Every structure is written in structure tokens, then in C-alpha cells.
Image: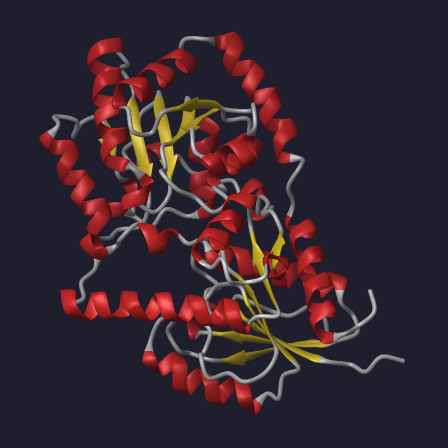
């Protein structure tokens, strides 16, 4: 009979978008999959109360150390060692570099290797550059130290192979992501459009607004869409309030688009129920990103029957195949033309909506968690 093992999961991102949604769905599904091993879920104060274990073998531990900090490297390391884990699973790259025991990571992308976030940081430039060097070193060490590295697409796997050709490619495990069921079942009963000062018709974009999200070209393309093709609706850009979103709001004013481009996240925290409402009432979803690891938000749109026009990049071709309309993300005229084509072609729109429903069926967090569970068992030497 196999011995019971103790697995730690870094869930400090819980409550935040991106990695937080990833770890939430992994933990919830692992609770259903593994009734034998013990799990220790490490959380910051922000997400501590929102997670309540349903499996008696799961317990939560407060580890209120912010990611990407020196406190994480020392204080959090001490908390990990106190739990005497047999395996530590990190759904990101930010491992305590001195952690000595078995490790599995899930690294979503290598975008920070290519695109800087310096324009949006409040850190001194020299300190920011130092942290960027540290980031690269931690990613390298995480890959070297991990028994397996789970990646969300073949495109990301290809990036790793190019960046780290000396690492055995068998170390990488592909596990696609899925749509969080919460996003489909938590509709708002209030008049969200009035609350957020949005009017129909509108085109929707939901994301952070880092450099690689390509918002500058999207704003220029929207100006072309209005002036050349006569689109009378709005562009709604939903994201958190930060230096990036504020700078794009200022750019929209310079382009003469202040009345027709809305940034609801600058004045309000836009909830999951409100984004669900916005998706259900939009003309279409547009996503011009230059680089993605999996690119989840168009899939979330498709799950609600919202047609998508997105950038023609390798990740998108892999995940979305023929279920969306593609445009050249470096060409604002082409972007505007494809958006106009979709707006004015009901037959094409209906066809892509149906393809979208079928595409969504190919991905689920249950499958992601099952692959993760298999990786954990393999790393622990447990029978499948």
C-alpha cells in the first residue's frame, strides 16, 4: 500500500486575475481528484477567507508574503519548510530559490522575457532593471529544479525550447486551460451599462493593458473604424487601474475618442458578474495581443456566444483554429477592416459563433487538473 504524501500548493495569487484564477481551478478540481494525499494550500490574507476546503485532506496555511519580493525568498521559505512537504507545486515561476525538496511548476508564458513592463512600474529604473535580471534567474532556476514544468500551449513549450535548449524537452508537459464556470453563472441583476456609463452598441476588450496587449494599435484601429467605416458605437476596455490603463485613457483623448472609448476600470472595480453582463451585450470581442501563453479571454467570450476578432499569432492559431476572425496585429488598417467585416456580415458572425461553441468544448479545467494530478503522482513515484 502506497504511503500518504503531503503536497504543498502556492495559492498566494488566489483572488487576483490570471494566476489567481488558474490556481483556484486547479485546487478545486484536485479536491475532487485526490482523496488519498494531504494538501497544504498556502494563501495570503487577501484570499484566505475566500478559500474553504471541501476535502478533509486539504488544509490552508496563512503565508502573507507578496510574490516577487525578498521576503518571499526568506520568510515564505521558512513557512514551507515547517510543513515538511513531500512535493511543492507552484502554478507560476516565483519559487523560493533555496527550497531544497521536490518541485513541480506550471509556468504560463515567457512574455516578460520579450516585453517590458517598465513603463507601468512605480519602481526606480535601476531597481526595476535589477528585478528583471532576478526574474530571469528565478525562471531559469525554476525550470532546472522542477521535476516537470507544465505549460498551457505548444507555443509556450516552443519558447522554452528556444530559450533553454539545454533542458531536456521531456521535462515540459502540455496542459491547456479552460473557462472558469464562475464566469458563466454569476450574472448581474443591475443595469451594468448605466452604472459604468456604457452605451450600446459597443466592442469589448477585457485584459490587463501591458505593452504586449497592443492597446495603442487597437485605439488607432478604432479611430479608423469610426472615421472610415462609420461605426457609431463605443470601444469598452476593461482592466485594472494602473499606469498603463491611465496612459491609454489619455491617448484616447488625444485621438479625439474620449466620448466613444470607455475605461470602466479606472473609476470602478469591474466584477465577474459585470464582465459577464458586458460579454452578453457586446457586438463582438476584440483581442489584438502580440503574445500570449494561452489567451483565455476570447474563449470566455465564445462560451457566451460572443464572436471574436483576434490577432494572428501562433498561440491564437493553436487554441482557436478556425473559430475566430484573424487580423494582422501590427496593421491598424487591417485590424479595422476585419472588425468591420465581422460587424457587417451576419452570416459569418453566426458561423463563427457556432464554431466558437464547439471550440470551447475542447478545453476544461477538469482536464488541466487531471494532467496536473498525473504529474504530481509521477513526481512522487505513486502508481497511476
Q: Residue furthest left?
A: 254
Number of marks present in the image shown: 0
In the shown orientation, is residue 13 left or right of residue 257? right
In the shown orientation, is residue 210 left or right of residue 375? left
Q: Is residue 49 visible?
A: no
Q: In the rendered view, would you say 118 is above or below 290?
A: below
In the shown orientation, is residue 27 left or right of residue 76? right
Q: Residue 99: horizontal and vertical position, in percent?
A: 50, 83
Splitting the image into 4 quarters, where does residue 291 fall? top left
In the shown orientation, is residue 10 left or right of residue 354? left
Q: Could you say which is closer to the camera, residue 272 or residue 348?
A: 348
Q: In the rendered view, would you say 326 is above or below 54?
A: above
Q: Residue 233: horizontal and vertical position, in percent?
A: 29, 19
Q: Residue 212: horizontal and vertical position, in percent?
A: 31, 43
Quadrant placement of the C terminus:
bottom right
Quadrant placement of the N terminus:
bottom right
Which residue is found at the position 69% from the left and 51% from the top? 366
Which residue is found at the position 72% from the left and 75% from the top? 380
Q: Residue furthest front?
A: 166
Which residue is found at the position 21% from the left and 66% from the top? 128
Splitting the image into 4 quarters, where does residue 326 fall? top left
Q: Residue 237: horizontal and vertical position, in percent?
A: 31, 36
Which residue is found at the position 13% from the left and 28% from the top? 255
Q: Could you say which is closer to the camera, residue 65 or residue 321?
A: 321
Q: Is residue 100 visible?
A: yes
Which colour assignment does the render follow? secondary structure
Splitting the image into 4 quarters, where does residue 125 fall? bottom left
Amino acid at each position: 500500500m502506497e504511503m500518504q504524501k503531503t503536497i504543498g500548493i502556492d495559492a498566494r495569487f488566489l483572488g487576483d486575475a490570471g494566476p489567481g484564477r488558474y490556481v483556484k481551478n486547479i485546487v478545486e478540481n484536485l479536491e475532487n481528484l485526490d482523496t488519498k494525499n494531504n494538501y497544504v494550500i498556502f494563501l495570503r490574507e487577501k484570499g484566505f477567507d475566500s478559500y474553504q476546503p471541501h476535502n478533509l485532506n486539504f488544509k490552508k496555511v496563512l503565508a502573507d508574503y507578496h510574490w516577487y519580493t525578498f521576503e518571499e525568498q526568506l520568510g515564505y521559505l521558512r513557512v514551507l519548510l515547517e510543513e515538511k512537504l513531500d512535493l511543492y507545486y507552484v502554478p507560476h515561476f516565483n519559487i523560493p530559490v533555496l527550497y531544497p525538496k521536490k518541485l513541480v511548476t506550471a509556468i504560463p508564458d515567457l512574455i516578460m522575457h520579450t516585453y517590458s513592463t517598465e513603463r507601468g512600474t512605480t519602481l526606480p529604473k535601476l531597481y526595476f532593471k535589477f528585478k528583471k535580471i532576478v526574474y530571469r534567474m528565478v525562471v531559469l532556476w525554476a525550470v532546472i529544479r522542477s521535476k516537470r514544468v507544465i505549460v498551457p500551449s505548444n507555443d509556450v513549450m516552443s519558447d522554452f525550447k528556444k530559450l533553454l535548449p539545454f533542458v531536456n524537452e521531456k521535462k515540459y508537459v502540455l496542459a491547456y486551460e479552460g473557462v472558469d464556470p464562475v464566469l458563466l453563472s454569476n450574472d448581474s441583476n443591475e443595469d451594468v451599462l448605466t452604472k459604468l456609463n456604457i452605451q450600446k452598441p459597443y466592442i469589448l476588450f477585457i485584459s490587463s493593458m501591458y505593452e504586449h496587449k497592443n492597446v495603442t494599435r487597437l485605439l488607432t484601429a478604432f479611430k479608423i473604424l469610426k472615421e472610415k467605416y462609420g461605426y457609431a458605437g463605443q470601444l469598452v476596455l476593461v482592466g485594472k487601474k494602473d499606469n498603463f490603463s491611465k496612459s491609454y485613457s489619455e491617448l484616447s483623448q488625444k485621438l479625439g475618442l474620449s466620448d466613444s472609448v470607455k475605461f470602466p476600470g479606472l473609476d470602478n472595480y469591474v466584477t465577474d458578474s459585470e464582465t459577464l453582463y458586458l460579454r452578453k451585450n457586446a457586438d463582438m470581442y476584440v483581442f489584438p495581443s502580440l503574445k500570449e501563453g494561452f489567451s483565455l479571454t476570447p474563449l470566455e467570450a465564445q462560451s457566451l456566444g460572443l464572436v471574436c476578432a483576434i490577432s494572428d499569432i501562433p498561440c491564437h492559431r493553436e487554441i482557436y483554429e478556425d473559430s475566430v476572425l484573424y487580423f494582422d496585429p501590427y496593421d491598424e488598417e487591417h485590424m479595422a477592416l476585419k472588425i468591420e467585416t465581422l460587424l457587417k456580415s451576419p452570416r459569418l458572425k453566426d458561423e463563427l459563433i457556432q464554431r466558437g461553441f464547439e471550440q470551447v468544448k475542447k478545453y476544461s479545467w477538469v482536464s488541466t487538473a487531471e494532467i496536473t494530478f498525473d504529474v504530481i503522482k509521477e513526481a512522487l513515484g505513486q502508481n497511476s
